[in-house]
Image (spheres, grey):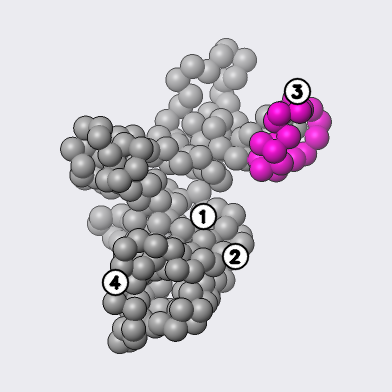
Amino acid sequence: MAQSTGPGRRIGIDLGGTKIAGLMLGAGGAILSRQRCPTPQGDYAATLKAIAGIVAALERETGTRGLPVGIGIPGSLSPATGLVRNANSTWLNARPLKHDLATCLARPVRLANDADCFALSEAVDGAGKDAGSVFGVILGTGCGGGLVIGGKLHSGPRAIAGEWGHIPLPWALANEHPGPACWCGKNGCMEMWVSGPALERDHFEASGERLTATEIAASANSDAAA
């Protein structure tokens, strides 16, 4: 697909556990358009369709087509197979997501771990731009981490350096063992303690009230349990 108008424009997608967000950026980094939709839970084909729909809407709104697309994803691509692994959106695991998205969008796409994208962005021109080493942390449906050293992303030979969601909680109390069961098959992973779902679980156990993480945060100033 040939690019139509808008030199320097590009599209960025954040594929999250609960939402998919898209931006179109101009040549100078200005946000030209935004789109967002819920992430189809457990449905790989619907996830591909949702991403394609966001890209189409961004291009339709700005009168462009065929623009470069970069996508931040949970988990990472295996250097050996190119398949997604370690994603808490488990329906993505063992899938050729990069290939399938390139087919859906009829253009090459760039995929990278979402926490790596965040850490590198902050190291280049954000909160960590003057630091020699930057560790960026994402807390959402899960928890992810990215490591930048000397201005360069450090991903390691298996492309998971900086990821900390599946290490055990280092300061767990005796009554916290073995910890909550994780989707990875282990117990007590960091992701089970410091993520949105973990906050919701802890709030329910303390208050008996089921609220979303967003609702808990909104009520934190007036609600002692929150």
The front one of 198 and 218 is 218
The front one of 136 and 194 is 136
Task: Give the x, y percent position of residue 194.
Answer: 54, 32
Real-space CA distance between mark 1 and mark 2, rounded to the nearest whole angstrom:
10 Å
Real-space CA distance between mark 3 and mark 2, rounded to the nearest whole angstrom:
33 Å
Disc 1 to disc 2: CB gap under 8 Å = no
The single residue placed furthest to the top in the displayed view is: 174
Residue type, mark 1 in image:
Gly
Q: Name the residue under label 3.
A: 224
Residue 43 sits inside the magenta stretch: no
Secondary structure, mark 2, is strand
Secondary structure, mark 1, is loop
Residue type, mark 3 in image:
Ala
Task: Give the x, y percent position of residue 14.
Answer: 46, 58
At label 3, counting other C-alpha atoms closer than 10 Å, the crowd grade (few under 14, some 14-19, many 20 or more) is: few
Q: Name the residue under label 4.
A: 8
At label 4, counting other C-alpha atoms closer than 10 Å, the crowd grade (few under 14, some 14-19, many 20 or more) is: few
Residue type, mark 4 in image:
Gly
Disc 4 to disc 3: CB gap under 8 Å = no
Mark with earlier residue (2, 4): 4
At label 1, counting other C-alpha atoms closer than 10 Å, the crowd grade (few under 14, some 14-19, many 20 or more) is: some
Q: Mark 2 points at which residue?
A: 37
Camera-nearest label, 4 or 3: 4
Secondary structure, mark 4, is loop
Q: In this view, does 217 lie to the left or right of 93?
A: right
**Is residue 95 something that shows in the picture?**
no
**Is residue 218 something that shows in the picture?**
yes
Magenta-drawn segment: 205-226
Residue type, mark 2 in image:
Cys
Is 175 above or below relative to 158?
above
Q: Is residue 59 left or right of residue 120?
A: right
